[in-house]
Image: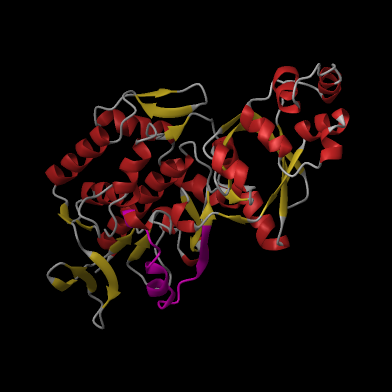
Amino acid sequence: MIGGGPAGLMAAETAIAAGVDVHLFEAKGSVGRKFLIAGKGGLNLTHSEPRPGFDARYRERAGEVGAWLDDFDADALRAWARGLGIETYVGSSGRVFPLDRKAAPLLRGWVRRLKDSGVHFHVHHRWLGWDGAGALRFATPEGITLFSADATVLALGGGSWPQLGSDGAWVETLTATGAAIAPLQPANCGFDIGWSTHLAQKFAGAPLKPVVAHWQDLAGHAQALQGECVLTATGIEGSLIYAIAADLRDALTRDGEVSLHLDLAPGRTLARLEADLATPRKGRSLGEHLRRLAGLDSAKTALVFEGLDKATAQDMPAVAARIKRLPLRLQRPRPMAETISTAGGVCLEALDDGLMLQAKPGVFCAGEMLDWEAPTGGYLLTACFASGLRAGRSAGAWLAASP
């Protein structure tokens, strides 16, 4: 097993349960580093959304990922955590968390159980591919090390957060085998907009809640979703933006531009907002007028003023319309290295149903390095666990059937 994230660890657990001698290699000095970072926000393990709605979160890969979930779904993940002594609960949003909302106790217990079951851990081993005889090559502090394996599960992550180990360096190596690789690209990402210096300096980090996002999907259908997001120095990010990032990113790729509209006052109709703002200002500044009469906080008010000309600022019906449908022109997704996850990777068509590379028998792939994506909310982790289980199980079965 190469890669010590959830997919690699689950593959190791599944394979060793099948009686396979398992060695797990990790480039960093410890396993589960991205998992631990995710835990800083409460460790959203999975989601309580029932299937098939759960499966639909994987977009065009709903069928393939749904097959993995048939073996290991959200309920199975919660039961698995319980087996490690970690009870979970469903939050108000439907997201599932450990009771203590921490990742470290779960990871420690899991690694301890893997070691007790016989999994051999090798840290500071960065995979470099294969040598001419088919042995695995690793860069270690002592130099290049070779390791011969009868089967290999690759769980190397995508291209997000490279400082934690998933830097996409494997793409060139696997491309050389003939495997089809879709280009890695940002997912669950923020977007650059290009604010004025005033807004960027004064309101970076300010939350926008609640707001409703309006956009068009790739088929041209109007979509709307309520949630929360955050202003950044360069643009906008947060859970609402992550949830629709795939549509926005793909539209940018296809069209070179995309517009997003925000309803900054979702609790008020346009007619009510127009009536509220028609109230005489009585010497109040426009900003104070918006705060008092439209219920906007300072960050939302600054957004209304951003790029607003003086004439329009005195036209209250136009201001009301702007509040209800604020136009934002997105320039580009944030760089892949700072996104929560990535899209692209090993094309599922390059694998058999057991996630073995058709171009390289005996080599299996799992986790975020595969070409699927999902929004945050526990869907990412669930599919990583489920794909790791399938790859580990398939590797064990392949070894059992090998002469």
**Residue 352 in picture, x, y percent from top left:** 45, 62
Q: Which residue corresponds to the image point at 73% horizontal and 49% vertical from the top-left?
A: 259
* Residue sitting at the far front: 283
Rendered image quadrant of residue 71: top left
Query: Can you see residue 202?
Result: yes
Instruction: Looking at the picture, tell me which residue is in the foreground, 348 or 336.
Output: 336
**Residue 219 in picture, x, y percent from top left:** 75, 51
**Residue 216 in picture, x, y percent from top left:** 74, 46
Rendered image quadrant of residue 213: top right
Q: Which residue corresponds to the image point at 71% horizontal and 41% vertical from the top-left?
A: 306
Q: How many numbered marks have been drawn onto this rendered protein structure? A: 0
Q: Does 139 appear in magenta? A: no
Q: Quadrant of the N terminus?
A: bottom left
Instruction: Looking at the picture, tell me which residue is in the foreground, 149 or 339.
Output: 339
Instruction: Looking at the picture, tell me which residue is in the foreground, 328 or 5.
Output: 328
Q: Is residue 243 above or below residue 274?
A: below
Q: Is residue 24 above or below residue 197?
A: below
Q: Does 175 appear in magenta? A: yes
Q: Quadrant of the C terminus?
A: bottom left
**Residue 103 in picture, x, y percent from top left:** 30, 35
Q: Which residue corresponds to the image point at 16% horizontal and 54% vertical from the top-left?
A: 121
Query: Can you see residue 56?
Result: no
Q: How is the image coloured?
A: secondary structure
Q: Which residues are magenta?
A: 164-185
Q: Which residue corresponds to the image point at 46% horizontal and 48% vertical from the top-left?
A: 340
Instruction: Looking at the picture, tell me which residue is in the foreground, 306 or 320.
Output: 306
In the visual, does 396 lie left or right of 370?
Answer: left
